[in-house]
Amino acid sequence: MPRDLPLGNGRLLVNFDKSYNLRDIYWPHVGQELHTAGDVSHTGVWVDGQFAWLDSPDWQRELVYEPETLVTLVKLSHQVLQLRLTFHDCVDFARTIFLRHVEIENQADHAREVRLFFHYDWHIWDAADGNTVFYDPVTSALVAYKQQGYFLMNGQIQANASEQPIIGISSWATGIKEFHSAQGTWKDAEDGELGRNPIAQGSVDGTLALHLPGVPAHTTANAYHWLAAGTCLPDVVDLDRLVRERGAESFVTRTRNYWHRWVNKQDEDFADLAPELVDLYKRSLLVLRTQIDHGGAIIAANDADIQHFSNDSYSYMWPRDGALVANALNHAGYPEVTDIFFEFCNSVLTEGGYLLHKYNPDRSWGSSWQAWIDANGQPQLPIQEDETALVIYSLWQHYQKFGDIEFVAPHFHSLVVSAGDFMSDYRDDQMRLPKPSYDLWEERRGILSYTTATVYAGLAAAAQFAHLFGEQGLETKYQQAADEIKAGALRYLWDEERGHFLRMITVDKDGTIHKDATLDSSLCGLFQFGMFSPDDREIVQTMQKLEETLWVKTAVGGMARYENDYYQRVTDDLSQAQGNPWFICTLWLAQYRIAHAHTLDELRQAVPLLQWACARVLPSGVMAEQVNPFTDEPLSVSPLTWSHAEFVLTTRWYVGKYHRLQSGK
């Protein structure tokens, strides 16, 4: 199920699903330690002897954010209960505190008691066993803990404006779940009363209640709930005390103000783009920020439901995804976010000068299926070489944008030269193309056009760095390697008979070359990273073939990844769709139209593709990886960090090209 509303600050990330269930709590790293297993943590309300969980179909829901912030604006209305609830949820921008402000509008003609229930399904440190949850009488709060993970849950009520707020939970339940058929304490809430069991251990959950007595007719009462995360009980008690002293609303307000200022850090001219596209650009920046760990890891996606599909998740730092996200953020003007990403890459680069498949946020190796030996038992590097190349390319883009030589200097020898030497040496002796590695989709191994284009770009960037630091010998070495790669691409990867570039070639021991002519959206990399001009005959013909073949023929439209794409495929009718439409692939086509444009009219041909993406995001502005070619339903993970990065980058390309064309440059 998509994660419609991610909220985070680089240390604490929480996700809500489309039914407004709290699903994921990641801490202290974004994407590494999941303390809920992606299970539902329920929220409910009791009034006049009737109870409803917020995921009940009887609620009318609107799940969005407050404009240009990372504070939610969730509106729920229940006709039978005669209640309207408005939630403003946030993770404090600096501290590991998750806050929920609830406005409860009593639509009945008489005063009523309203009770709110907040449930947490704990799997602290990714495990259900060995958890404890207890009621703490000192703070009037629930506390869940295991090892060095503590979570304090508290609240505050104010039934009407004339009363002083009451701090502390009104009632609670602690108990066992997922054991001997026990469903959990959330079931205890459905009669409006909680059992007040003081402590439970093992596979546990906890539910707290906030009772608002006497909410007047046709008026609004306020309640606040917060969760504080820390490594020990004193840490979370201190955070709780801070909320009590300053007031819960002050944390919501300051977080609202912070993110509004963050996403508007500089005056922007968005050319002639429509307001809804500008809004999605800003929403994409904010969503990107939620997926970035404080240690520099840019996580691909944090949607725990994908584990049911693959027994693993997207909650890793792929250097390729990270480099492309960093590049988008660089061009959007956020070096303070990307600096630590490059430090991350510098720290994990192998002695051989290459980056591995993927990493955890704590900089350890991520899980991998890329083998260290080939089918014949011979050693091979388990890498996607584009991941190494794109980090160097993106670092050069960072320097070009900000001119911060003091930042890049410490990375020159340890990162740029190490990777540059690897890329220049790791090449086929005859063709001078990069040796085989795994492709960006992680499905095949060979000499790939996309990888070739990124290695060219990485070497060209390394040559520029070498020139910057006066290393003439290295500059010549890297530039010559880049030139040889481009020549090799034209000779071995261009197919004149078919009229487009090949996706991949493989070479037998006897030198026989096998061609993979599958039309693949990744061929866009041949112009994206500067190896070829978008006006080159070979690129023009390739892009025409891609659009003709991969554009989805249903009413949904959009670009598939490649011919006969099997991943989460909805239909086997390839005449309708070669695969599901992907946001990134559709935005790559927009980037080509932008790069190929010579007039403003030609440039505006990219706008429908931006609008295509805008029309298929969730109401909150979150983008998935792909969508159903018949229904527009989001598929696979959501949000996908890469999708948002491509929207940001495509917007930057459009605005930049607009001003160049307008000025006649």
Image (cartoon, rainbow, N blue to C red):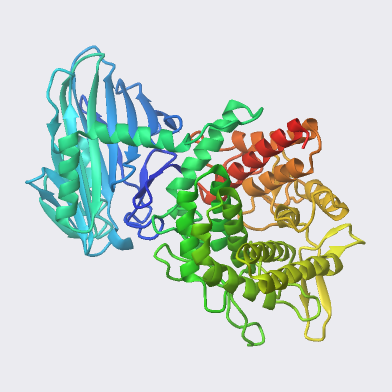
Q: Quadrant of residue 37?
A: bottom left
The residue nearer to you, when weighing 56 against 92, is: 92
The residue nearer to you, when weighing 299 against 533, is: 533
In this image, 198 relative to 633: left or right?
Answer: left
Q: How far across and down, in percent of the image, does residue 331 sit?
A: 58, 46
Residue at the extreme left: 138
Name the quarter where the C terminus is drawn.
Answer: top right
In this image, 254 relative to 204: left or right?
Answer: right
Q: How far across and down, in percent of the image, does residue 419 sit?
A: 60, 71
The residue nearer to you, when weighing 423 against 623, is: 423
Vertical placement of residue 114 versus 318, above or below: above
Count of marks placed on residues: 0
Q: How far across and down, in percent of the image, does residue 552 sit?
A: 73, 44
Q: Quadrant of residue 370?
A: bottom right
Q: Quadrant of residue 62?
A: top left
Residue 553 can be seen in this image:
no
Q: Residue at x 58, y 42 (%)?
A: 648
The residue nearer to you, when weighing 76 against 26, is: 26
Vertical placement of residue 372 versus 271, above or below: below
Residue at the extreme right: 497
Residue at the extreme top: 109
Q: How far across and down, in percent of the image, does residue 267 sit?
A: 53, 31
In this image, 274 relative to 358: left or right?
Answer: right
Vertical placement of residue 265 versus 419, above or below: above
Residue at the extreme front: 470
Residue 350 can be seen in this image:
yes
